[in-house]
Amino acid sequence: MDSQKKSGTGFWSVVQSVLAAAIGVQSKANKERDFKHGNPIHFIVGGLIGTIIFVVAVWLFVQYLIHSSS
């Protein structure tokens, strides 16, 4: 478990990698680290959760704009 944290594939590293990949600024070093030491399931789940959060945030923003314009 300790070696996993040292390799940089902990929770916050996955969150950072998913966010960086989502906006297209993932560094080559981090991408290689993710492919070499990361668990694909963690990145898939992180991507799905990130997508859901983004869609809900956009939906809430649109609802706010609709209600504030009337």
Image: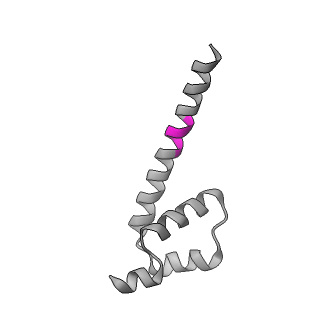
Query: Which SS does the magenta portion mostly show?
Result: helix
Question: Where does the image place residue 45, in percent across and percent down from the top left?
Answer: 41, 58
Q: Give the residue displayed 46% in from the left and 83% down from the top.
A: 7
Q: In this view, does 1 lie to the left or right of 36?
A: left
Q: Give the residue displayed 42% in from the left and 73% down from the top.
A: 10
Question: Where does the image place residue 58, in percent across and percent down from the top left?
Answer: 57, 37
Task: Give the residue furthest to the front.
Answer: 68
Question: Where does the image place residue 33, in percent across and percent down from the top left?
Answer: 53, 80
Give the magenta range.
54-58
Residue 10, above or below 19: below
Q: Give the residue displayed 57% in from the left and 19% down from the top.
A: 67
Q: Give the residue displayed 44% in from the left and 52% down from the top.
A: 49
Task: Give the residue furthest to the bottom.
Answer: 3
Q: Is residue 3 left or right of residue 18?
A: left
The quadrant of the picture occupied by the C terminus is top right
Is residue 20 within the magenta segment? no
Task: Give the residue furthest to the left.
Answer: 1
Chosen colour scheme? one colour
- Residue 25: quadrant of the picture: bottom right
In the image, 64 versus 34, the foreground residue is 64
